[in-house]
Amino acid sequence: VSLAVLTHTPTLRGRVGSPILLHCAFAAPPSPFVLEWRHQNRGAGRVLLAYDSATTRAPRATPGAELLLGTRDRNGVTAVTLRLAGPAPGDEGTYICSVFLPHGQAQTVLQLHVLEPPKVTLSPKDLVVALGMPAELQCHVSGFYPLDVTVTWQRRSGGSGTSQSPGDTVVDTWTSGHRRAADGTYSRTAVARLIPARPQHHGDIYTCVVTHTALTKPKRVSVPLLLAGTEGPRLEDATGLFLVAFVLYGLIHWLSP
């Protein structure tokens, strides 16, 4: 009996929690068959789904795994695709699609890589510092997978020019260890401690730059440093300017012939 098992998706990249299809099909003469989907990761293996076409029972599957069984086409090919409803980091690894006929068996192997890009936030959101006082920036990187992530700091002096390393405006930087969430993703925090603020630091823009394999380009989050009392005109000042303009307009209008 001739039997061939194939896949159109030998290597897949999936997002955490996003449904994904692992394609598998086999070509064989009409015959009862048994299907088995097995998952292997880091030396451990388990059967995700088993199906016997000779019975009327539904496939035996673990939660989150579903068989998408196609009908045999005119070329003798039957699709036996596996759908994962919401893969987690622990679901990455090797998937083996095996088909058993009364007089033979065959299988194909697929590799699933689970990726999740990081979320990046800066605190404080408003970096307002009193003259002569130090400040601290925290860059929170969360919800990413796999583990490797790089966090760096950049500064643009006075809000103009090109970004560069923070240089002498940063006393110290450090990054926390990785923390693992219940869904298997990771988070960590990078900290930059700034020197006491000087007048020339007003308007400096600090940027947290994060690189990760799930990102097509580095993710950047920025915040400007503002010296307290120099954020812009106060409400009283704006009101005074409006009144002066109003009086001048009236005076000019009165003096006009």
Image (cartoon, rainbow, N blue to C red):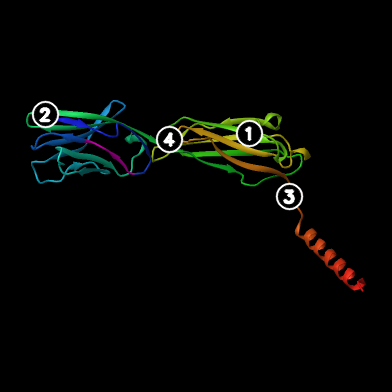
**Seen in the image, is 212 located left or right of residue 97?**
right
Disc on the earlier residue, 2 or 1: 2
To which residue does mark 2 refer? 2
Q: Give the residue type at disc 2.
A: Ser
Disc on the earlier residue, 1 or 3: 1
C-alpha span from label 1 to label 3: 22 Å
Where residue 155 sits: x, y (%)?
A: 66, 35
Mark 4 residue element: loop
Where residue 209 sits: x, y (%)?
A: 57, 35
Question: Which region is colored magenta?
Answer: 19-24
Where residue 77 sits: x, y (%)?
A: 17, 37
To which residue does mark 1 refer? 154
To which residue does mark 4 refer? 145
Disc on the earlier residue, 2 or 3: 2
Residue ID at (17%, 43%): 59
Q: Give the residue type at disc 3.
A: Glu
Mark 1 residue element: strand
Q: Give the residue type at disc 1.
A: Gln
Marks 1 and 4: CB-CB under 8 Å?
A: no
Above or below, 184 relative to 1:
below
Residue ID at (26%, 37%): 23
Disc on the earlier residue, 1 or 4: 4
Q: For the residues carrying marks 2 and 3, which lies nearer the camera in this image?
A: 2
Residue 64 found in image quarter = top left
C-alpha span from label 4 to label 3: 39 Å
Number of the label disc, if any, that sits on residue 231: 3
C-alpha span from label 1 to label 4: 24 Å
Disc on the earlier residue, 2 or 4: 2
Marks 2 and 1: CB-CB under 8 Å?
A: no
Mark 3 residue element: loop
